Image: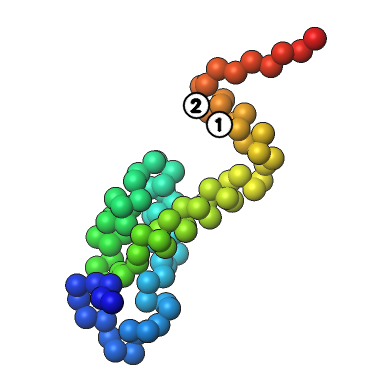
């Protein structure tokens, strides 16, 4: 199965490190994901920055999911929900007796 249009060096063909994102790429993916850019556009942007990159859409998706989990992990689910309501100016009401 060919991942890229260009040749990969023979010593790297079966390596798991070939498709991994470097730290700089992960920061770029996180920035774009926070701005609600679609994953396919994020992947295209990452590949434009580094021509030798052979990252797949799954790796970009995994980075985005880890980012979401790290944001939510600090708070309880309901706290996160109410924070999202406030950030995006949704209307919500709490009844008290």
- Looking at the image, the residue that sits furthest to the left is 5
- Looking at the image, the residue that sits furthest to the top is 97
Alpha carbons under labels 1 and 2: distance apart: 6 Å
Report the residue at 69% width, 40% height from top: 76
Quadrant, the C terminus:
top right
- Examine the rendering and report whether any part of residue 27 can be seen: no
Judge from the rendering whether residue 45 lies leftward or rightward of residue 32; answer left or right: left
- Where is residue 9 drawn, in percent x and y? 27, 86
Judge from the rendering whether residue 97 lies leftward or rightward of residue 67; answer left or right: right
Quadrant, the N terminus:
bottom left
- Examine the rendering and report whether any part of residue 40 can be seen: yes
Within-10-Å neighbours for mark 2: few <14, some 14–19, many 20+? few
Vertical order, 3 against 69 (above or below): below
- Looking at the image, the residue that sits furthest to the bottom is 11
Report the residue at 20% width, 76% height from top: 6
Specify the label residue 84 is tagged with: 1
Specify the label residue 88 is tagged with: 2
- Where is residue 21 drawn, in percent x and y? 41, 66
- Where is residue 59 drawn, in percent x and y? 42, 63
Specify the label residue 67 is tagged with: none
């Amino acid at each position: 199965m060919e991942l890229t249009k260009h040749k990969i060096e023979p010593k790297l063909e079966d390596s798991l490190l070939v498709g991994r994102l470097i730290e700089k790429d992960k920061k770029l993916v996180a920035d774009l994901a926070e701005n609600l850019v679609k994953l396919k556009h994020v992947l295209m942007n990452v590949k434009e920055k580094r021509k030798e990159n052979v990252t797949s859409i799954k790796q970009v998706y995994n980075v985005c999911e880890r980012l979401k989990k790290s944001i939510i992990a600090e708070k309880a689910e309901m706290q996160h929900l109410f924070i999202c309501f406030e950030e995006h100016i949704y209307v919500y009401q709490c009844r008290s007796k």
